[in-house]
Image (cartoon, rainbow, N blue to C red):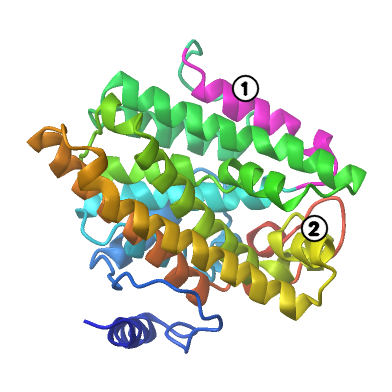
Amino acid sequence: MTTADTTASATRDLAAYGPGLGSAPRYAFFCPMPYAMNPHIEAARTHTLDFYRRLGVLTDKGAEAASGYRIEVWSACVHPDCDEDSLKLMHDWDMWGTLTDDYMEARDVSLVKPMIEGCLAILAPDTAEGARPGAHPLEIALADIWRTTRERGMSPRWNQRLADRLSRWIETYLRDADIRAKDRLPSLERYIDNRLWSGASPAYIHLTTLAYDCEMSEALLASPTVNAMLHSCSTFAHLANDVYGLERDASWGDDINAVPIIERDFGCTREEAIRRTIELADNYMRHYLSLEKSLPSVLPQASTEDREKLDTFVTCFRHYMRGALDFYEGTGRYDERPEAGDYHKVGWLAAD
């Protein structure tokens, strides 16, 4: 199937799923991976919205606003082949990450520090299970899905790696709040390094291996090639996110985004900066593909079991990049224009 064929297939299927989806792509990113969607998408959507309403994260109006984000499209496209129960858990995580990102993005660190500390405490290995007294509902939700995840039977090593990666992501909100307060954007090189963790992809790509019961060996995870693939896959998704989310970020005064950084560093127009960002993302995609092609030669001693798991992991990478683009095209999240302020009170947060 050609790239044009897969794009047409995605357009038809997304359009059938709901209004606002399936239109012609707004940006021409290079992504030759085939489109796919999990058939359990509606069950996952219903389950997760009920879960967050029950815990008090979303009111009925908030749930209606959050529904417009269509996070279930992300979950179903990134995990197209997993079973229904696994997709529901992945969607719980994906919704938590989206809502937490909205809540945590702030200019004044004091607005988010208590919740950051609460989330880090839940993920700490020496902390008693559960959220702190008086915890924000998002902390309570994290404690719940973290417990469910640990009960899925992955090894303690796998669980600790997920906790470490989630913690590194959550900690970046302190750094980013400081950057906003000082109005001092990093260089593009530093930004891309920071974005690896602030974009949360290492944690969420790790989660995909749970959906397919594919626990990688330490030897594979330590491979420089596999780590370079993780970096390229993550950076492609993050740069694409920067392009699609640019106007939403700018509306509340947030320039922690590759496009304005490139605009500043190259002294170019906003339109040219967008083009350069897409070109940079495409280069990361090509780098990923070259690394993927080199795997047989760089891991010649891998066991048959490791090779099978690596094949699954490669499929996870591919679905992650393609699913990201399909979600960015279909979500209503980036159509929002929050008012300028110390934080952005958008969509579900402003519903009441």
- Number of labelled discs? 2
Lateral position of residue 36 relative to residue 339, left or right: left
The residues colored magenta run: 106-125
Q: Residue at x 73, y 78 (%)?
A: 272
Q: Residue at x 48, y 76 (%)?
A: 330
Residue sitting farthest toward the right: 182
Q: Please tell me whether mark 2 sits on a helix, a strand or a loop.
A: loop
Q: State the predominant SS element of the stretch in magenta.
A: helix
Residue 195 position (above or below residue 16): above
Lateral position of residue 216 relative to residue 7, left or right: left
Q: Position of residue 75 (x, y in %)?
A: 38, 59
Say which quadrant the N terminus sits in.
bottom left
- Label 2 to label 1, Cα distance in Å? 32 Å
Lateral position of residue 152 relative to residue 58, left or right: left
Which residue type does callout 1 highlight?
Answer: Pro
Judged by depth in the image, the label closer to the viewer, 2 or 1, is: 2
Q: Residue at x 20, y 49 (%)?
A: 311
User: Which labelled disc corresponds to residue 254?
Assistant: 2
Q: Position of residue 20 (x, y in %)?
A: 50, 84
The reply to whether residue 352 is visible in this rendering is no
Residue located beneath label 1 in the image: 133
Q: Residue at x 51, y 13 (%)?
A: 127
